[in-house]
Image: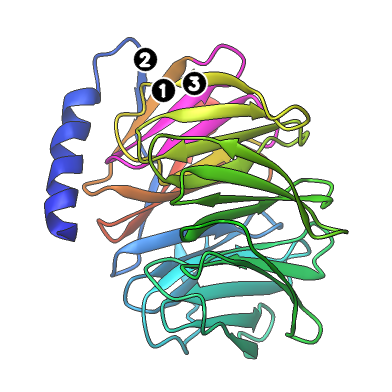
Amino acid sequence: MWYFRCIVAICFGLALGAGCGHKTLSAKKTLSHGSFVNSVAWRSDGRTIASGAYDGTVKLWDVVSGQVTATPTGHAQPVSCVAFSPDGKMLASSSVDHTIKFWNIATGRNTATITVSGHVGPRIDVAFSPDGRTLVSGGSNNAIKLWDIASGKSIATLEGHIKPVVAVAFSPDGRTLASGSFDNTIKLWDVATRTNTATLNAHTGGVLSIAYSPDGKTLASGGWDHTIKFWDVSSGRNTDILNGHGDDAYSLAYSPDGEILASAGTIFVRLWNVATGKNTAVLDGHAGPVSSVAFAPNGKTLASGSTDMTIKLWDMTSDK
């Protein structure tokens, strides 16, 4: 089934790719992970990226040299998500093996392992709070868990979704948590009181990805219905719909200045002008569906990870 979907995505993506009134950009560097890349993340230093892959490996890369600087090992099954702590000193990786592991970047050592027996299935999404003290995870038991980083203990379980939770994100101020689910909804949670403050009937298919704008006023979401939507966080109102993505929107990322949204799912990465809602560029270079996108802290480079087993680095200054 997975391979059939990849073929459909490739063929459909080719049909929707070039020649649609926008620029087509090429990658400036390609890194070979050696297995389907499920997740990519930037460290705060802007020199390091992490990738997590289907073969259970995590790799750290120097983006200047393109070389692997560390390969933390320990997961027994595919790695679904990687995330750096805000200070860049720690990496969290989640896996289908029911664990979340924490890695010391300076030493490369596994400092703690959390067993998340309830979070099973093809994806466990994780994200650090802006203050770096809390990790959130979402999984197929329909629940969201908050973890204390210092102790590795669960401090809260947020329940309300009726299908698996596959996307989680903290607001930039850390006061609100957003979760996206296969139940087609996005829920907003007050972190302090741990209560559900709003439920957005987001998509006609499952919600696959969410991303807060840098100012925290807007939430972007991507779904199985092949659309990308923008939501006003304060009112819960849908403010715009992007219909040109062309496939399931597996990953979304805002540029640090909030002017560009990157979307992934087909073999292309699309760049959208947030103000106008127009697709301004297509990043063409992957040979398989793109599963993850992430902007560098300075916004000058975008990283994308794909089922073609590569990470590509794209020069965003050429799109200005």
Cα–Cα gap, marks 3 and 1 = 18 Å
Magenta part of the chain: 256-277
The reply to whether callout 3 and callout 2 are in contact (CB within 8 Å) is no
**Residue 281: which disc?**
1
Relative vertical location of residue 100 with respect to residue 308 in this rendering, above or below? below
What's the residue type where badge 1 is placed?
A: Ala
- The residue positioned 56% from the left and 56% from the top of the image is 161
What's the residue type where badge 3 is placed?
A: Ile
**Quadrant, the C terminus:** top right
Quarter-of-image position of residue 220: top right
Observer-nearest residue: 130 or 153?
A: 153
The reply to whether callout 2 and callout 1 are in contact (CB within 8 Å) is yes
Q: Which of marks 3 and 2 is nearer the N terminus?
A: 2
SS at badge 2: loop
Q: Is residue 63 visible?
A: no
- The residue positioned 47% from the left and 73% from the top of the image is 59
Place of residue 191 in the rendered image (x, y in percent of width and height, measured from the top left): 81, 57
**Residue 241: which disc?**
3
Place of residue 259 in the rendered image (x, y in percent of width and height, measured from the top left): 64, 24
**Quadrant, the N terminus:** bottom left
Q: Which of marks 3 and 1 is nearer the N terminus?
A: 3
What's the residue type where badge 2 is placed?
A: His
Cα–Cα gap, marks 3 and 2 = 18 Å
Q: Is residue 235 left or right of residue 124?
A: right
Residue bearing the label numbered 2: 22
Q: Does the stretch in magenta take in 265?
A: yes
Relative vertical location of residue 8 with respect to residue 148 in this rendering, above or below? above
The reply to whether callout 3 and callout 1 are in contact (CB within 8 Å) is no
Observer-nearest residue: 135 or 74?
A: 135
